[in-house]
């Protein structure tokens, strides 16, 4: 007789370009969870290869995570916007397919202790609320290019109460072409009714350095075109020394690799790490500045550390979220 699945349910959707990011997320979820949970991974037709699915299935077995894959139909209304692929619309398809309570997490996130406490709010929420979302921090330091500026909530982490879902396809069909269309649609449908929980459950990286100690994050979301896995690893020490928001992701990546020591999966993980560094579309959009820098540094090979050292001399005049050009600390400036 099949064993019953745990009550807590995490849902994601990816294409092949996000396989490595999801692997790191899987590991961080499993390592920090206080209770058992199971995972469903959705994918649009022909966007996630059998090889990718085999790797993720083997990893989930190693992590003792029950995992189900769910193929989903594509739709011409699912458009690409900048670095955001049509897979982002799978959030709606999966919510329709899974009427039970569940937690959606974008694959460009990492979990820390306490992340699964959000299930208490999700299971207690009524269908009338529609969604459980994290509060969006308010300050004057939000990057002007930040996705979804002006919207009530970011759609990277969504708690779905049990029950029927609202119609989203009809309003999507008549929706104007706006930035982050999927996120705008979520706010249109649920902005007035969604139940709000702590920002800790979807902490955007630009907010992390502004939180007080009592607001330690439970889920860090690396939104934007520039992802931690794009950075050449010989340069990650700069982020680690600065303990910028990316340091938490690099910690999770290292813990996954350590766990797989002497496991044949480590070779596959390394393969996906190399593939992940090559993802991301080169664009002259303002919000792709960090990605352009990472790709340029990757092309420079052994000269990249020298370039970073020189560029850091003027880092005080660039946004502190430009990885790995973080402002030098006072002690570092004095030693140079």
Image (tube, rainbow, N blue to C red):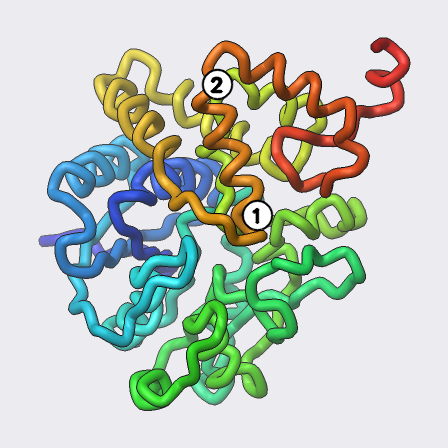
Residue 266 to residue 219: above or below: above
Residue 105 sits above or below residue 196 on the image: above
Residue 4 position, x and y percent, is 22, 57
Please report contact status of discs 2 and 1: CB closer than 8 Å, yes or no. Answer: no
Point out residue 290 in the picture as x, y percentages from the top left corner: 56, 40
The residue under the point 78% across, 62% down is 139
Q: SS class of the residue under badge 2?
A: helix
Which numbered dot is residue 300? Answer: 2
User: Which x, y percent locates residue 163?
Assistant: 35, 82
Residue shown at 39% from the left, 31% from the top: 277
Residue 173 lies, with reference to residue 50, above or below; the image says below
Residue 88 picture location, percent across and down: 36, 63
Q: Is residue 103 left or right of residue 140?
A: left
Q: Is residue 164 visible?
A: no
Question: Quarter of the image holding residue 49?
Answer: top left
- Gap in angstroms between the C-alphas marked 2 and 1: 30 Å
Residue assigned mark 1 = 220
Quadrant of the image for the C terminus? Answer: top right
- Left or right: where 194 falls relative to 242: left
Mark 1 nearby-residue class (10 Å; few <14, some 14–19, many ≥20): many
Considering depth in this image, is 200 or 230 the residue closer to the camera? 230
The answer to whether 243 appears left or right of 132 in the picture is right
Disc 1 element: strand
Q: Counting residues from the N terminus, which is met first, the one under dot 2 or under dot 1?
A: 1
Label 2 neighbour load within 10 Å: few <14, some 14-19, many 20+: few
Q: Which residue, as the protein is rendered here, is positioned at the far front? A: 284
């Amino acid at each position: 007789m099949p064993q019953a699945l745990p009550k807590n349910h995490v849902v994601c959707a990816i294409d092949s370009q996000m396989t490595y990011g999801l692997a790191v997320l899987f590991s961080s979820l499993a390592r920090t969870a206080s209770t058992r949970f199971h995972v469903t991974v959705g994918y649009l037709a022909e966007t996630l290869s059998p090889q990718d699915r085999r790797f993720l299935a083997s990893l989930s077995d190693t992590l003792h995570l029950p995992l189900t894959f769910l193929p989903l139909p594509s739709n011409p209304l699912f458009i690409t916007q900048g670095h955001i692929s049509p897979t982002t619309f799978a959030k709606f398809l999966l919510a329709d397919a899974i009427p039970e309570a569940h937690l959606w997490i974008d694959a460009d996130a990492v979990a820390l202790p306490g992340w699964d406490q959000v299930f208490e709010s999700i299971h207690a929420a009524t269908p009338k609320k529609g969604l459980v979302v994290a509060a969006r921090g308010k300050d004057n330091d939000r990057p002007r290019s930040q996705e979804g500026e002006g919207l009530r909530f970011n759609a990277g982490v969504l708690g779905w109460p049990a029950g029927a879902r609202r119609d989203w396809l009809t309003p999507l069909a008549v929706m104007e072409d706006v930035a982050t269309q999927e996120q705008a649609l979520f706010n249109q449908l649920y902005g007035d009714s969604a139940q709000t929980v702590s920002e800790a459950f979807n902490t955007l990286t630009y907010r992390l350095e502004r939180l007080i100690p009592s607001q330690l994050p439970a889920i860090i979301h690396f939104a934007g075109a520039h992802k931690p896995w794009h950075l050449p690893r010989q340069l990650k020490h700069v982020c680690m020394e600065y303990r910028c928001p990316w340091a938490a992701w690099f910690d999770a990546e290292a813990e996954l690799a350590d766990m797989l020591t002497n496991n044949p999966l480590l070779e596959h993980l390394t393969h996906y790490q190399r593939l992940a560094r090559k993802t991301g579309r080169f664009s002259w959009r303002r919000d792709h500045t960090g990605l352009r820098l990472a790709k340029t540094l990757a092309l420079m090979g052994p000269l990249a550390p020298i370039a970073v050292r020189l560029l850091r001399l003027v880092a005080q005049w660039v946004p502190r979220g430009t990885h790995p050009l973080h402002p030098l600390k006072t002690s570092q400036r004095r030693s140079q």
